[in-house]
Amino acid sequence: MKEGNAALFEFEAELPDERLTRLAARLVSFTARFDRLRQDLRLLVDRDGLEKWCKQHYGRRLPLLDSVLDRYPLAVFHGDVGTGKTATAEVAANMLTRELKKEARLFKLSTRVRGAGNVGEMSMLINQAFDVVVKEAGRARLAYLIIDEADSLATRRSVQQSHHEDKVAVNTLIQKIDDIRQHNGRVMVFLCTNRFIALDPAIIRRAAFVEEFNRPNDTERHELLAMDCEGLGFSSAEIDELVRLTGPSGRHKLRYTFSDLRTRVIPEALARAFPERKIALADFRAAVDRVAPSPAIEEP
């Protein structure tokens, strides 16, 4: 991370990035989702490609291009905690950059931009963050900004208990999203939130598209468990049992999220076997018995 950016960004990465390429292979259902979102994303960042397509197929610039290019380069990903929103944004930005054969820089905004509560601090830090991102974009270079837990910065201004500083910060965020349209698709923002309904309507209206992330279904949990349990010697029937145990027909009413499985259930099962013996199916049963799925986010 560049010096001076630590207060603004949780991390930065040059794209294409090999770590994110490897992550794509482990991100369950990413390929199907990206195949569905690819064209929406390309319409936002490949302005030159759109102009060339128009001239190639129609011999002139069509009026509809103005409507398409006038959209805000903003995507909103929403859903429960642990359903892969932020990871998908990171990997999608990486894949898109690779497919377009361009270079890019990826930024993930830090929650520290909320500041310490000083007057005007949050707005100042948001301005600084966007300034850094915009400076990274060039004629043949893209810049992506991921804002995780976006509801903490973009809460509805109409909410009665909303603090004045929060309202000012939302106004600033809206203005910066407005401003990046002038960069012709070279800057794109992903907003990721667990509380979609808490977002200010003006933010939602500006989104070029909104994508919902649900808890993994039986097929998706089976894919993840089969992938991560490879080499443990579990039969197909045993994987099926783990799928059932981590779904609503198991002990708990909610399905386990991707994060629940990978950061809580699997480590808990491993901890029961390490370092004396191999992992047994009973270790997973005990892990599920002890580790409950993440609670659903309650919307206001």
Image: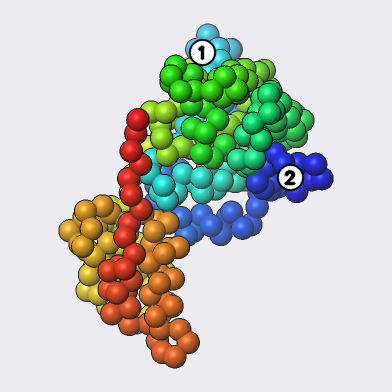
Q: Amino acid at mark 1?
A: Ser
The tag on residue 6 is 2
Q: Element under label 1?
A: helix
Q: Nearer the viewer, residue 211 or 35?
A: 211
Please indicate whether residue 171 sits to the left or right of residue 249 in the image.
right
In this view, the mark in front (2 or 1): 2
Q: Position of residue 117 (x, y in %)?
A: 64, 31
Residue 30 vertical position relative to residue 8 in the rendered view, above or below: below
Which badge, 2 or 1, comes first in the chain's sequence?
A: 2
CA distance for labels 2 and 1? 37 Å
Q: Amino acid at mark 2?
A: Ala
Please indicate whether residue 68 sits to the left or right of residue 114 in the image.
left
Residue shown at the point (27%, 69%) measured from the top left: 289
Query: Residue 282, located in which quarter of the rendered image?
Result: bottom left
Q: Callout 2: few (<14), some (14-19), or many (20+) C-alpha neighbours within 10 Å?
A: some
Residue shown at the point (75%, 33%) measured from the top left: 132
Q: Check disc 1 and report the residue beneath it.
A: 67
Q: Position of residue 153 (x, y in %)?
A: 55, 30
Q: Nearer the viewer, residue 233 or 48?
A: 233
In this picture the colour scheme is: rainbow
Q: Nearer the viewer, residue 209 or 192?
A: 192
Q: Residue furthest left?
A: 249
